[in-house]
Image (cartoon, rainbow, N blue to C red):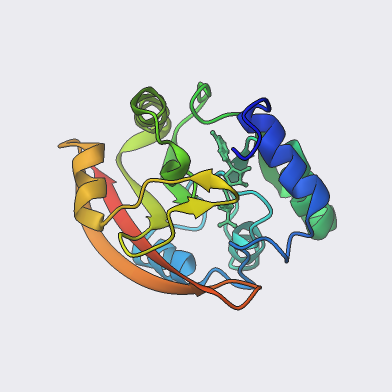
């Protein structure tokens, strides 16, 4: 955090309050790689999907348009969720919204698919990664799938002013442990709104 006196929640709330959702470095008009991996997961349209740290991402818009009917978006910043709800208008009523820190969240139900683009990579403290994995284990159905996207080893060292961990699919698989099998990986040279490029990796895992 650029200002060590503010909390994680305050940092992200401020980001989404100050910046336009299309100006943040991670903005995507259409999250094509995520959508391709979700399609590859072979889920039915009524399967439960949670976008963890979904922010103001347009993934939920695209999934609604594709006919998915059991969607949840979780984010630490209520301001991000509010932006997405406003964009969706009446369609927002069909989505469950959770304002929570993933490292403290206790899921109340199970999901068939967990999607995370650029959230786990902010967890630089081992105890936060352990807490994230506890939430993942508690939320995901046995046989369920997790798509986790992060900066790749040749990606940036910071995002939104915060230090990040960079992962290759193999190091992410090691991090998740033997309870998850790596099924598919993709790389994406993400183009930022400012014209830069960031190397992302996306990994799709199955919970054994
Ligand atoms: C780089 S943005 C990515 C947003 C979105 N996934 C996307 O691809 O557009 C990281 C997101 O994670 C959220 N976030 C950061 N730390 C979090 C945490 N501990 N728990 C839940 N959400 C968190 C932020 O508010 C932000 O929306």
Q: How many labels does the image show?
A: 0
Q: In which quarter of the image is ligand 1?
A: top right
User: Furthest-bottom residue in view?
Assistant: 195
**Identity of the residue drawn at 26% across and 47% down:** 172
Q: What is the quadrant of the N terminus in the image?
A: top right
Give whichever of 161, 14 is nearer the camera: 161
Left or right, 144 with reference to 105: left
**Identity of the residue drawn at 72% across and 47% down:** 15
Instruction: Examine the rendered structure and indicate whether residue 87 appears above or below residue 119.
Output: below
Decide if residue 186 is in sight here: yes
Decide if residue 208 is in sight here: no
Give residue 178's quadrant in the image: top left
**Identity of the residue drawn at 62% across and 66% down:** 62
Q: Could you say where residue 188 lies in the image, as x and y percent from the top left? A: 40, 72
Q: What is the quadrant of the C terminus in the image?
A: top left
Q: Could you say where residue 128 lies in the image, as x and y percent from the top left? A: 42, 27
Instruction: Examine the rendered structure and indicate whether residue 119 appears above or below residue 19.
Output: above
Instruction: Examine the rendered structure and indicate whether residue 6 appears above or below residue 204.
Output: above
Give residue 157's quadrant in the image: bottom left
Q: Could you say where residue 126 lies in the image, as x and y percent from the top left? A: 34, 27
Q: Could you say where residue 121 lies in the image, as x and y percent from the top left? A: 42, 45
Left or right, 182 with reference to 55: left
């Amino acid at each position: 955090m650029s200002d060590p006196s503010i909390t994680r929640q305050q940092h992200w709330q401020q980001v989404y309050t100050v910046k336009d959702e299309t100006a943040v470095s991670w903005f995507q008009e259409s999250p094509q790689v995520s959508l391709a991996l979700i399609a590859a997961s072979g889920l039915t349209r009524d399967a439960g999907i949670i976008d963890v740290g979904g922010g103001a991402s347009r993934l939920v818009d695209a999934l609604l348009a594709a006919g998915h009917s059991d969607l949840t978006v979780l984010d630490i910043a209520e301001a991000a969720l509010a932006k997405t709800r406003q964009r969706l208008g009446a369609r927002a009523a069909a989505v469950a919204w959770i304002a929570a820190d993933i490292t403290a969240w206790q899921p109340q139900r199970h999901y068939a698919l967990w999607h995370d683009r650029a959230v786990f990579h902010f967890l630089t403290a081992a105890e936060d990664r352990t807490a994230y994995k506890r939430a993942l284990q508690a939320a995901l159905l046995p046989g369920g799938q997790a798509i986790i996207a992060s900066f790749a080893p040749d990606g940036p060292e910071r995002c939104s002013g915060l230090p990040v961990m960079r992962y290759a699919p193999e190091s992410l698989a090691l991090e998740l442990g033997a309870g998850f099998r790596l099924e598919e990986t993709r790389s994406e040279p993400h183009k930022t709104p400012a014209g830069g490029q960031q190397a992302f990796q996306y990994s799709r895992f199955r919970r054994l």
